[in-house]
Amino acid sequence: QVQLVESGGGLVQAGGSLRLSCAASRINVGLNRMGWYRQAPGKQRELVASITPGGSTNYADSVKGRFAISRDSAKNTVYLQMHSLKPEDTAVYFCKAGDSRSYWGQGTQVTVSA
């Protein structure tokens, strides 16, 4: 079955950087819309960034200019590079593959301390 495995989360100070990875199996990241979502405690899951098969990217207003989504088709992996992290970026970050039929990873915790 399709598997999405996120990694790269952790604890970082405000202003720091992290790079999240989403390693996919049994689904081609280059042929599917891929997205990063996050969910903070007590809040709804929200879209952070997405990339289409054609390479078009979309970002939440709150992360524009700080985060960048990319993919490596050879490694079948999607990345989320995060810079200038803020405490409000603290959340569990999830990788999603597909649209009408979608798959989710288990999430990776990102904690940004003030």
Image: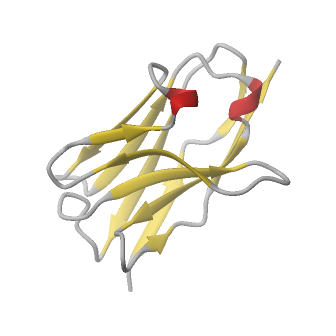
| Residue 65 against residue 68 in the figure, above or below | above
Relative placement, left or right, of 56 versus 6 is: left
Q: Quadrant of residue 9?
A: top right
| Residue 64 against residue 40 in the figure, above or below | above
| Badge count | 0
Relative placement, left or right, of 101 versus 94 is: left
Colour pattern: secondary structure
Q: Residue at x 27, y 72 (%)?
A: 27
Looking at the picture, how far across and down is residue 5, in whole percent? 48, 62
Looking at the picture, how far across and down is residue 91, in whole percent? 71, 45
Front residue of 75 and 70:
70
| Residue 64 against residue 109 in the figure, above or below | above
**Residue furthest to the front:** 61
Q: Residue at x 38, y 48 (%)?
A: 50
Looking at the picture, how far across and down is residue 41, in whole percent? 83, 51
- The N terminus: image quadrant: bottom left
**Residue furthest to the bottom:** 1
Front residue of 101 and 21:
101
Q: Residue at x 29, y 59 (%)?
A: 33
- The C terminus: image quadrant: top right
Relative placement, left or right, of 13 versus 79 is: right
Q: Residue at x 52, y 66 (%)?
A: 105
